[in-house]
Every structure is written in structure tokens, then in C-alpha cells.
Image (cartoon, rainbow, N blue to C red):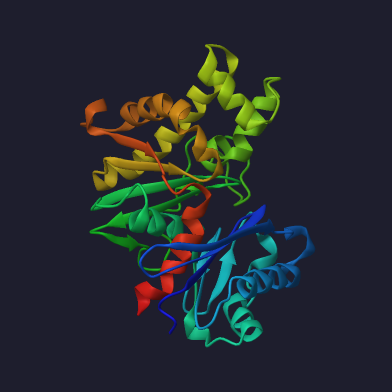
Amino acid sequence: MNAGRLVGIDLGGTAIKAGAISATGERLDRLEVQAEVSRGAEALLENLIECARQLGVTESLGLGVPGLVDREAGLVTQSPNLAPLAGFPLRDRLAKGLGLDPARVRIENDANVAALGEHWLGGAQGENLAFVITLGTGVGGGLIIDDKLFVGERGLAAEIGHTIVEPGGPLCGCGNHGCLETLASATATARRASELGLGGDLKQLSAEARQRPGAARDLLLEVGRDLGRGLAQVAVLLDLRCFLVGGGFGAACDVLKPGIEEGLLERCYGRTREDLRIRPASLGPDAGWIGAARLVRESD
């Protein structure tokens, strides 16, 4: 294996972010293109192959995708935001298109690879126990336990976006009502803002919330509370104290944080504000592809 160049791809519902990084953590190349989900699985595959080729993939590739992953079969079994990929033989088709050994193509949930990236080179470095939440088209979660990515018995651990925060709430793409994803994702926040007549531009909304009290700040406080209420379920079970907020909407961590603290403390037993370490993920939009690049190295 070319240990000097690791290639990773982060496939989102809107964009594909990809890059190459050295085994020592030096970022070598980066690119971003539209995912074009509406064109179907074959078009997505073509885009992924082209990205990997541009980055000079040689012997291995890591890929992060939103949804449930069958690691043994190398495919996505369910993805509310990437429905065309459900059941598609993604690993094998990628390997064939790139001339790689299928064993050298690793597929993992996107929030898990973000957590892996943050633990390797980002805000979770040195944390023995940490939870990374990603706010984007949906809401994902990645869990670090004993300095390792924890995915559970069947790889379904940390799917916090599909825990129920508001029973009977908005319909989620997974078929349930009131999932955290329907309340605190970037998509959900834009919807909530539009319903209040605030528009759907989250950068503008966040800037306004920073500048002055008012409707924008109130909304992001409530979104933060919902996020904290969801995180409380994990905190109570695992005695978690360290939370990193990432994903595209993670840039609003500073204005979400007061609400997150309130939601956590509202539903957490035995916690004080001083117990909590809530901070922004430090790798920004690069966390996913960096963690994906790390995947194959982790399995060697």
C-alpha cells in the first residue's frame, strides 16, 4: 500500500467532499463537487470514481456515507438522504471502476468517519470518551470510546439523528415522527426559520443571532435545546461529558451552545454546567473525508 497518500471521500446529500492526506496528517489535496443525488446511483458512482481518480487513488479508498452501512457486503442498507444508494453494491462497483481490491475499499457511516477524523487530527484529540454530532442535511453521531471508534454489534451505534425527541413531531425521512433530525439539522432549522418568516439562510440567521437579541437568537436557542435533549439520551447512558458539534451547520455552535447546555441539563441526571465540554469540531467540512481516509489505515 502507498502509505504516504491516503484518499477519503465524504458523500453528503448535497455535496461530495474528498481529499488526500499523508499518513502523518499532512493534507495534500482537496476537492468538492455536487453530489447530484437526483440523477440516481449510477451517476453518483461516476462522480465518486472521478473524484478518486483526480486525487490519485492507488491502492485504497475510504468512503463516508449518510445512513446505515453493511460493512461486510460493502453497501448502504438505508439512507433517508441518499435513497438511490440503498442496496446498491457500492464497494464492489467502486473497486471495479478504480481497479482496486474490494478489500481495500472501506465504507462507513459519515458521522462515524467525522468522529474518526476529529479524534485523529481535530477537536477530540486526546479524548478517551467523546461524541461528535454532525449537523447537515440530517443529524449524525459518532462515538469514541477508549480512543477508538465504536460502531456497535451491527454498526448501528450513535445514530442519534433518529432518536425520538418530540413524540408525534414532524415526519422524518426514516418514517418516524419527531426524530432529532427533524428538529435540529440544518434542513430542519431552515424550515423552522422560514415558518417564522426569518428566511432560510442559516449563515445570515446565525450572524443575526450573534449580533442582537431577537427572533433569530430565540430560534437557535430552541434548536440548541432540542439538540441538547437528544444528546442527553447518550450522556445519561454513557456518562459522556465531551461533545463536539460539526457538520456544515456546526459553524453555528457558538450560538447553539447555550441551548445545548440547557437541553442537556434539563434531561441529564447528576450533571452540572461545569461537567459539560461542548465545543465546535475543529476540522470543519474536512472532518468526514479525513476520517474516511483514515479508515483503511485503521484496518491494517
Residue beneath the point at 42% across and 25% down = 259
Count of all numbered marks drawn on residues in the image: 0
Residue in front for this viewpoint, 152 or 274 = 274
Quadrant assignment, res 193: top right
- In the displayed structure image, the side of residue 259 where residue 269 appears, left or right: left
Q: In the current view of this chain or complex, which residue is farthest to the right?
A: 39
Tell me: residue 260, above or below residue 146: above
User: Residue 11: horizontal and vertical position, in percent?
Assistant: 60, 60
Tell me: residue 249, above or below residue 259: below
Residue beneath the point at 44% across and 46% down = 133
Q: Is residue 225 visible?
A: no
Q: Is residue 65 visible?
A: yes
Residue in front for this viewpoint, 231 or 213 = 213
User: Residue 123: horizontal and vertical position, in percent?
Assistant: 35, 47
Quadrant assignment, res 31: bottom right
Q: In which quadrant will I find the N terminus?
A: bottom left
User: Residue 171: horizontal and vertical position, in percent?
Assistant: 63, 41
User: Residue 44: horizontal and vertical position, in percent?
Assistant: 70, 67
Residue beneath the point at 69% across and 30% down = 200
- In the displayed structure image, the side of residue 5 where residue 147 appears, left or right: left
Q: In the current view of this chain or complex, which residue is farthest to the top?
A: 213
- In the displayed structure image, the side of residue 26 where residue 17 appears, left or right: right
Q: In which quadrant will I find the C terminus?
A: bottom left
Tell me: residue 12, above or below residue 76: above
Quadrant assignment, res 149: bottom left
Residue beneath the point at 52% across and 25% down = 220
